[in-house]
Amino acid sequence: MTAAAKKQQVVDTTCSSLLHELELIWDEVGESDAARDTMLLQLEQECLEVYRRKVDQANKTRASLHQALADSEAELARLCSALGDGVFISPAEIRAGTLKEQLGAIAPQLEQLHQKKEDRTKQFMEVKSQIRKISGEISGSSQNGDAESFSPSDEPDLSLRRLEDYQAQLQSLLKEKSDRLHKVLDCINAVHNLCAVLGLDFFKMVTEVHPSLDESGSNQPKSISNDTLNRLAHTIQSLQEEKRRRLQKLQGLGSALLDLWNLMDTPSEEQHLFQSVTRSIGAADSDVVAPNALAYDIIEEAEVEVERLERLKASKMKELVLKKRIELEEICRNSHMEPDASTAQDVTNAFIDSGMVDASELLASIEDQISKAKEAALSRKEILDKIDKWMAACEEESWLEDYNKDENRYNASKGAHINLKRAERARVTVTKLPALVESLSSKTRAWEDERCTPFLFDGVRLLAMLEEYNFLRQEKEEEKRRLRDQKRLQEQFMTEQETLFGSRPSPNKVSNGKRSQNGGRTNGNHAAANTNRRLSLGGAMLQPSTPDLVTPRVNGVTPSRGKDNKKERSRPSAPVNYVALPKEDTASLSSGAGSDPTSPQAD
């Protein structure tokens, strides 16, 4: 017998005993059968109502269990869909057994999925909180990324794939934050270096950009927003422009100091105080990194010093102009040029005293003349070197000429062997004179053609001097030929006299007779000496005898003077400057007429 049957038996037994007891009571009371039937019918109806209520209550309970089971299944499906990750529970596993058994089976699954969702939600909250925080730092907004700002309903997808996407986004933002932080630190370092060079307050400068950039506020994270980076870049640009402006100003002051020091001959002790200023001349922006190198104090001190030197310069302007004029004259004298007469000392003093010309402009004009004179000296250097060689060769020729006239040059006197060796060297030098003169002439013509101006040597045109030299050289050649002819006629006359009279007349007598016949002409040596006196006196340069010799070349060609020129050349005026002739001509002349006929020609 089952428990329900047992319970029914107990109920039946109880109902029977109660009914028997009721009948006994009715018997004792004396109830009628109709009353008894009515009371039994009421009793049955009351029992039926009780059963009906119990059945209805059981149906409601079953319906609620079905609804709870359906809700649990729906919640389970929703959690599996939200969490993803392959989470799936088969309905067959759940719907086996009674409703309560099914609910009992699904409850642990739901609890496990709810716990998993809660953990996953916390992960999402943490990641999205960091994303919002970093995004706010980058954008410069006031978002803090608090956990309360995120709810599970905001993110229906709580799968691992979605979480990994957020984590990848977070890593990207972290990298961008790191890059921006490095960029901000680099900008701060650049601002610090520029402020150090310019002598500015670094903390004030960066605080104006953003308060978090101040290194003293270490508790506050540094701003890495676009606005902060842009303002830092603008600050750096403005500081660099200020640095360039100050550097240009300091370089200008340094150049002015150097010019004034050179003009005023300032002692090195005073210059040492402003070495930092003069060292900046020619320096690039990147080279100036010393602290306070471009501070306002340095620039102001340099300005004060320049103003002081300018006032001192104004009081000594005459001395400065004279100094520059002497420098110009020295350059012109070394290059054998004539300085500009418009800046002579008496002229400049008159200008300064009268106030007609600004002394600074006058000084600048002389400095410009010095610059041009240096350029001209550089272009004349090669020709001047050849002129020096020509003059040296002419001096050797003059010495050789005097040496050949010495009748005692072969005597065993002290130093005779030295003079003999020098004479040999002088003859070699003299043989090179024609080629040297030709080379000097060609280079001079090329110089004049290139610059369309005559080459003047101490105010005299060099080509005119060379032409005069060649002309005198030709006269010497003619004189040498005449002396040779005279000597030959003299020897012929002496031979005839010896044939007629049997004795050879003295050369001196013949010379004296010849002299009387020639209108008082002396012997050949004297005539050669007169000619040579026109050519060389101490090795100094000859001045052309006629003004036509200094006529400038036109397009590289000297205008012809025809017969008049030839006549004027035959009558040279007294020389002001003297030049030595080439030595090979003198040597040949000396060997033919300048020495004693009885002297040996081996020297």
Image: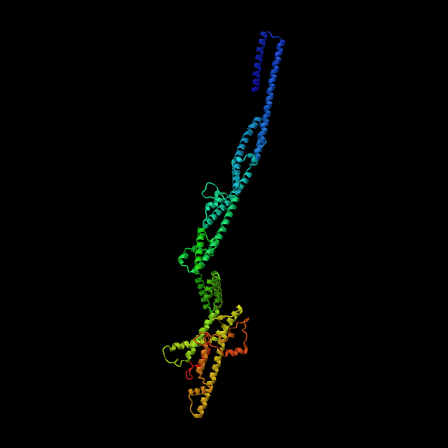
Q: Nearest the camera: 156 or 338?
A: 338
Residue visible at 62% across and 9% down? 35
Instruction: Please determine whether, in this image, residue 211 is positioned above or below residue 9.
Output: below
Q: Residue furthest right?
A: 34
Q: Is residue 340 visible?
A: no
Q: Position of residue 588 (x, y in %)?
A: 46, 80
Toward the front, the furthest residue is: 354
In the picture, measured across the screen, residue 8 lies left or right of residue 456, that is right
Seen in the picture, residue 415 relative to 137 is either above or below; the reply is below
- How many numbered marks appear? 0
In the rendered image, residue 231, in percent from the top left (x then y), is placed at: 51, 46
At 47% from the left and 84% from the top, the residue drawn is: 484
Work out whether 434 lies above or below 175.
below
Residue 521 coordinates in the image, percent (x, y) = 45, 84
Q: How is the image coloured?
A: rainbow
Compare residues 69 and 462 and report the one nearer the observer.
462
Q: Is residue 399 above or below residue 515?
A: above
Q: Quadrant of the C terminus?
A: bottom left
Residue 133 image point, x, y percent: 52, 39
> As rendered, which of 532 and 169 lies closer to the eye?
532
Q: Residue at x 54, y 40 (%)?
A: 166
Determine if residue 475 is in view: yes
Quarter of the image that includes the N terminus: top right
Rendered image quadrant of residue 87? top right
